[in-house]
């Protein structure tokens, strides 16, 4: 009843573990962004179908991937550094078989790990819409994409594990350096803060609508990096996750700082001011 979609770019290191976690599936698709390592070879050697598309934006890449000829009406979407736990694998198949027709997607709780520690308190966004009914979802936003669902969205109880630092701290920093540039450009164009509503941020019935509104409002706040660190450390309780939690909160705050200084740099360039 469930197909699996894994999006990749140079993932020969992490892909085998991801594929092992969904070995129960008879329809695994790897959607690759022209990897230059052995990603495609690894995928094919383990029986997965491989499709290649040149990457443009995260939303377009995922929308294109959702057009693949899946064998089943439901798709579990994963990144290569994620692992479907045994409990999740069972629940995904059970819920896909029993879901009422008006339900088009399910949120899954993702557990991020750093230094072998589950960032239980530090993790900002634990729920992601990852089990999708084919033909009823659409991705928007070029970076840190959102998924729009035609129908109701349910929630699973079993977790999905994310090895966010599997390639090392330098890789995480390099990736978020790219993300921060894209986020800064969205801020300058106004796309990241458009249609922000406090009402939606607090009371929107859909979880992802609330998150989108909260993120848009957050971008309007002064001293965002410092506020984010305080919030993560003492409101969310990152300090309770030990050294890994403190490190993660600091990294996330630095990421927010990069977004802000890059936004200012773009504006200075546009005004012809010295950099």
Image (cartoon, helix red, strand yellow):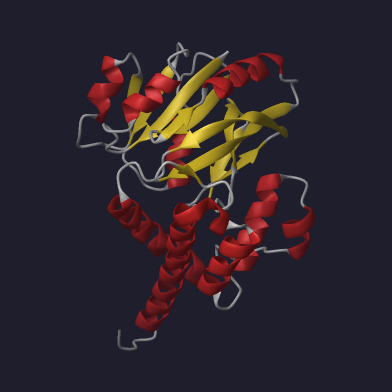
Work out which quarter of the rendered image holds the C terminus and state it.
Answer: bottom left
Asked if residue 149 is positioned above or below residue 232 in the image, the reply reads above
Number of dots carrying numbers: 0
Q: Nearer the viewer, residue 63 or 104?
A: 104
Side of 70 relative to 30 (left or right): right
Place of residue 68 in the rendered image (x, y in percent of width and height, measured from the top left):
45, 24
Which residue shows up at 50% across the image and 54% down it?
242
Q: Nearer the viewer, residue 237 or 54?
A: 237
Which residue shows up at 65% across the image and 66% down it?
217
Which residue shows up at 50% across the image and 30% down it?
77
Asked if residue 220 is positioned above or below residue 210 in the image, the reply reads below
Work out which quarter of the rendered image holds the N terminus and state it.
Answer: top right
Q: Nearer the viewer, residue 241 or 251?
A: 241
Place of residue 218 in the rendered image (x, y in percent of width and height, measured from the top left):
61, 67
| Residue 131, quarter of picture | top right
Asked if residue 60 is positioned above or below residue 275 in the image, the reply reads above
Q: Is residue 198 visible?
A: yes
Which residue shows up at 50% across the image and 19% down it?
3
Place of residue 121 in the rendered image (x, y in percent of width and height, measured from the top left):
59, 51
């Amino acid at each position: 009843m469930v197909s699996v979609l894994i999006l990749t770019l140079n993932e020969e290191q992490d892909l085998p573990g991801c594929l092992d976690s969904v070995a129960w599936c008879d329809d695994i698709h790897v959607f690759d962004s022209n990897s230059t390592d052995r990603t495609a070879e690894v995928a094919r050697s383990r029986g997965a179908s491989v499709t290649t598309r040149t990457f443009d934006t995260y939303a377009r890449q995922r929308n294109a991937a959702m057009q693949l000829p899946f064998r089943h009406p439901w798709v579990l979407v994963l990144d290569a550094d994620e692992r479907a736990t045994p409990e999740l694998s069972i629940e995904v198949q059970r819920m896909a078989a029993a879901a009422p027709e008006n339900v088009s997607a399910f949120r899954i709780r993702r557990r991020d790990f750093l230094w072998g520690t589950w960032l239980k308190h530090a993790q900002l966004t634990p729920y992601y819409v990852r089990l999708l009914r084919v033909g009823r979802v659409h991705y928007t936003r070029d970076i840190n994409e959102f998924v729009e669902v035609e129908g109701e969205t349910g929630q699973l109880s079993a977790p999905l594990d994310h090895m966010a630092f599997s390639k090392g701290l330098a890789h995480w920093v390099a990736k978020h350096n790219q993300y921060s540039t894209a986020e800064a450009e969205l801020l300058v164009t106004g796309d990241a803060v458009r249609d922000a509503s406090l009402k939606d941020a607090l009371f929107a019935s859909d979880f992802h609508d609330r998150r989108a509104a909260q993120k848009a409002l957050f971008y309007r706040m002064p001293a965002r990096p410092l506020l984010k660190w305080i919030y993560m450390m003492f409101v969310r309780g990152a300090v309770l996750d030990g050294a890994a939690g403190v490190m993660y909160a600091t990294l996330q705050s630095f990421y927010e700082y990069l977004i802000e200084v890059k936004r200012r740099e773009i504006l200075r360039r546009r005004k012809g001011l010295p950099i």
